[in-house]
Image (cartoon, rainbow, N blue to C red):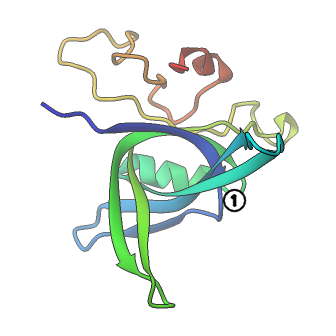
Amino acid sequence: MALCKVMIIGNLGADPEMRYTPSGRPVTQFNVAVNQSTKNQQTGEWVEATDWFRVSVWGDRAERAAENLRKGNKVFVEGRFKTREFEGRDGQKRTSLELTADSLVNLEKRNREEGDGEFAGTTSAPPRPAGAAAGAPAGGNAPRGNGGGFDDTSDLDDLPF
């Protein structure tokens, strides 16, 4: 058995793009920038590095992501990871880091005066096993949601890092 799971926290580089497959299934795609600071051992200066991930979200989560996410939003994404090689416009070989989201949480808060005070988040926990209690966590350390597509910051305490 093999497992290929990735968890990232980063910022959207642009507004999400939603479209539908020929069978009518919604898919939303967006890029997430993950920044990392490391200290140069020789100079002692801090160096910023950014990795970009292409994220795909499917089904109901895709529609909620397209409605709630905007450029610059900080998001937590958990999903399956794969790389894809392609040739860029300049003829150079490039590698794309792609993530199919199993779980997605918008870490941005909406201005409380703009709405009902809820947090503008999208989330989806892994499917619940048959017979599991409705209020029980879906399993593991995955962020849990209330099924309505909104979360509050108490779920951030459950992140496994």
Q: Is residue 27 visible?
A: yes
Q: Nearer the viewer, residue 97 or 157?
A: 97
Indicate the secondary structure of the residue bearing disc 1: loop
Q: Position of residue 130 (x, y in %)?
A: 17, 18
Identify the residue shown where x is 38% and y is 61%. 27
Residue 132's place in the image compared with 36, above or below, is above
Query: For mark 1, what is the residue?
Result: 71
Q: Residue at x 55, y 60 (%)?
A: 31
139, above or below 85, in the image: above
Is any part of residue 103 visible from this angle?
Answer: no
Disc 1 packing (10 Å; few <14; some 14–19; many ≥20): some
Question: Between 95 and 156, which is closer to the camera in this rendering?
Answer: 95
Quarter of the image where the C terminus is located: top right
Q: Position of residue 136 (x, y in %)?
A: 37, 9
- Furthest-front residue in this view: 42
Name which quarter of the figure residue 2 lies in. top left
Q: Which of 93 and 99 lies nearest the eye of the viewer? A: 93
Q: Residue 105 appears at what percent x and percent y?
A: 55, 36
* Number of numbered tags placed on the structure image: 1
Residue lying farthest to the right in this orientation: 113
**Left or right placement of residue 11 versus residue 31 in this view:** right
**In the depicted structure, whether residue 143 falls above or below residue 158:** below
Label 1 amino acid? Answer: Lys
Assign the N terminus to one quadrant of the image.
Answer: top left
Residue 86 percent location from the top left of the image: 36, 77
Residue lying furthest left: 1
Residue at 43% in and 74% down? 94
Q: Quadrant of residue 139?
A: top left
